[in-house]
Amino acid sequence: MSLLEVSSLTKRFGGLLALDDVSLTVEENEIRGLIGPNGAGKSTLFKNIAGFHKPTKGAIAFQGQSIVGQKPHTIAEMGIVRTFQETTLFQELTVFDNALVGTHMTAKTDVFSAILGLDKAVQRRARKKVMEVLDFMGLADRKDQLASELPLGSQRALALSVALVSGPKLMLMDEPFAGMNAEETNHMMDLTRKVRETGVTIVLVEHDMKAVMGLCSYLTVLNFGQVLAEGTPDEVRNNENVIEAYLSGAK
Amino acid sequence: MSDQGRFNLRHAALGAALLVIVVSVPHFLKFHHQDLLIFLTINVLVVCSYRLVTLTGEWSLIHAVMLGVGAYAATLSHNHLGLEIWFTLPLAGLTGALVAALLCFPLLRMTQFYFLIGSFAAGEAIRLIWVEWVSVFGGTSGLRGVEAPVVWGIDFLDPIPYYYFCLAVVTLCLLILYRIENSRIGLTLHAIHWKAALAESVGVDAWKYRALAFIIGSFFAAIAGGLKIHYLGSVTPNQFTIGFMVFILIWVIVGGYNKFYGPIIGVVVLTIFDESIREFEIVRPAIYGGMLILSILFLPLGLESIPSKFRSWFGAGSTPSEPPLTDR
Amino acid sequence: MDLVLQSIVNGLIQGGFYSLFAIGLVLIFGVMRVVNFAHGELVMVGAFTIWVVHAQFGIGYIPAIAVAIVLVTVIGLLMERVLFRPTRADPLAGLICSIGVLFILQVIATLVGGDGPSKQVPPPYHGTLVLFEMIRIPYQRVFSLVVSAAALGGLWFFLTRSKFGWALRAVAMDREVAALQGINTNKISIVAISVGAALAGLAGGLVAPLGNINPHMGHNVIVTAFIVTIVGGVGSLSGAILAAILYAMFHTFVTVYFGATIATIAGLTLMVVVLIVKPTGIMGVKVSE
Ligand SMILES: Nc1ncnc2c1ncn2[C@@H]1O[C@H](COP(=O)(O)OP(=O)(O)O)[C@@H](O)[C@H]1O
Ligand SMILES: [Mg+2]
């Protein structure tokens, strides 16, 4: 059984077919690349998997269990966490508190425990976990800064930390490298690999080909809402349909 | 949050001074001002409970009516079941929480503008039910007969004992509200305010937390309503109009809603101010209106932000810098 | 049967009023994203102006209406310039400011009119129109029906035929797109508030001889305007008119058979139901976030 199985997924926005009969499977602990020109439907696919949109048709199974129609928080509880295309953080909270929100699922509390302080042990564990992840991501010495005060590279690392600290099984990363310089990209690639090594499966949407080719062992190419090609980076690079799609869509 | 539980000598001194003031103040006041002090104490609870509702970023216009729900619940349970204030208050709170829980289903499907208008409509409808259903709620002239008890020879209708009683209840409630805000629940509410989608992506059930804030806020509002009505002795639908709601908004906004103590500053300062312009009875609302406008235009973070503004003007401490978007 | 027909006619007249102020609220919200809580007070100022200018100073009813329209429009323009424009980034701030204005206008009205009982303006038109020997409409109401219909017609003409009207609708539908097309949002805001305030002033002028005038009469106006706006669809002018007429009929009928308070409770409930079932209203477009 594959970790994630998407079959015949269709998403229609009014007259627009954003996803047209998309099927793909993701295996445990791989870094899957999902590429395609702008508007191909990559983000839409993520939103459908993570429950932010409801598919028009089709099935999505995670660990063999259907997740279509579930709310985002329920899907997160099952172990799928997405990151957002634009840098999305709690800008007005500190770095530490941002990541602390990420521990929600393991450190939830009820009103009475909160008032009486009965959840101290749980919260202490959550803080510890946050510090571990911030250390891991190289953000520990910035933990008291506001998220909005961070440079772009660190903001992206923080967004990844928020997702990571929630302990996902599958992480959907939407263009985490966009707008980064070479150095930041290298750093982010290292971080992504390290995340994979902790046992997390990753689906990566990215335009930065260096990052995609360097990280992913298997790619899926989307174009106009359809799967155009699948294969190893080399196979995809030499696929005629892909070349054509990218050339005709080139800016 | 990360700075929870920090405690030092300055805070201790401040707390002690505050305690001495609030305990001794009724003895220096005239009878009329003692009344006022009681209402001020109750209104502190009103604004703080309202702030909890606004933490998720939604502004409701039903809070005043929730006071009314508590007030009617207290009056009815006192008049018909013969319950004393020790029981009517919790009952009032629970009734408020229950009504809020039921209202969650329609109201929390909306956000922002729609929530604002929806909560206004729901509140107005509840208020009109009190007006219309005369046999239970007494119509426009309301209900009377509720009062505070006499215990061990202490008459709680006297302003000073009742003030201490209010002070105790309100302090307990504020403590609870403060604990909630500074717990993980508070953090989650803030997170929902700033980026609901991100919070949901890591497993936060935003609807549930918004409901929680609304229900807890209404619980304490209803308790405040009960406290008020046991002192006033009668309840009418006109005590909980949009007019009163506007006062709550003014207190919270003028005080500043970003900090726990902002609304408290707002209600205390404005109540004192209000008393000092008593002789201009007719124009009082206009003065309020003008102040509301001025504070929105010139002091959007409220009175609470004045000290830090001062500090930055005179160069002491660090000026809050514009956050850079990137380093490059 | 008589009662039903009579109620339909009364509802229609009432619907004309409702349209006048609900449309203003829709325009101002559509263009500026401000919920103008003081809109009911604008109607109140209009009515008070009639009381002062017509009933106290004895100037003709029609010129008094003109004065009311001008005065209320000026107040609206001041609100736009001093309050709504500086707070445009924060819609809540605009709403709070309008609450401030609400208080100020009420106090001014109290100062002008004294603290006594509600004022009355004797109707300038006497007599009753009798239709088919069973429907009776006082000429005063005939007048207000004709004038509000004419005003709405004029507005429709303005919105569909003039360049400003077109730009205004464009901004109300989508501010960003309109800005991209080079429409000057400040100018359009001025037009929107002028039209909205003028209609409120006119509504006040028309309602003055028909009921009680007091500084707090704006409350019922704003409650009605909210209901009509939500039911009609927040961004929709035609929706507002349709909802105004339907709601007026509804309110009139429920009032006849069950009483006014029940009618308002039913209206508020209807509004919450619409908010839940179809938040865009019966004819609404989606408000961009
Ligand atoms: N909420 C939406 N409503 C309507 N159309 C949408 C919505 N979200 C995305 N689309 C459309 O769906 C298509 C796919 O978009 P998207 O998934 O963002 O592409 P990608 O991430 O591959 O660049 C685009 O044409 C986009 O305009
Ligand atoms: Mg995308």
Image: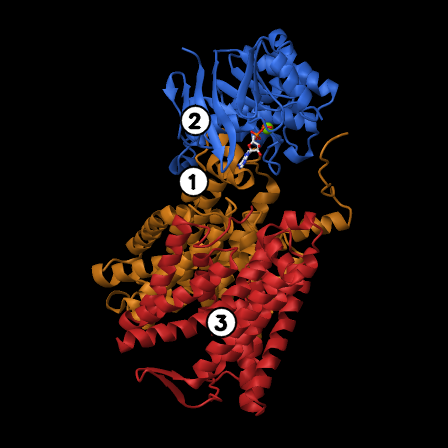
Q: What kind of residue is marked 3?
A: Gly
Q: How many marks?
A: 3
Distance between the alpha carbons at the discs numbered 2 and 3: 49 Å
* Letter of the chain in red: C
Residue B207, label in figure: 1
* Point 30% across, 82% down: residue: C134
* Disc 3 CB within 8 Å of nearest ligand 1 atom: no
| Colour chain B appears in | orange
Quadrant containing the N terminus of chain A is: top left
Secondary element at image label 1: helix
Q: Residue B139: image x %, image y %?
A: 30, 70
Does residue B180 lie above or below B296 as drawn?
Answer: above
* Letter of the chain in blue: A
Question: Are circles 3 and 1 on residues that touch, CB within 8 Å?
Answer: no
Q: Residue B198: image x %, image y %?
A: 53, 33
Q: What kind of residue is marked 2?
A: Ile
For mark 3, what is the residue? C218
Distance between the alpha carbons at the discs numbered 2 and 1: 15 Å
Residue farthest left in this picture: B81
Distance between the alpha carbons at the discs numbered 3 and 1: 35 Å
Q: Nearer the viewer, residue C77 or B40?
A: C77
For mark 2, what is the residue? A75
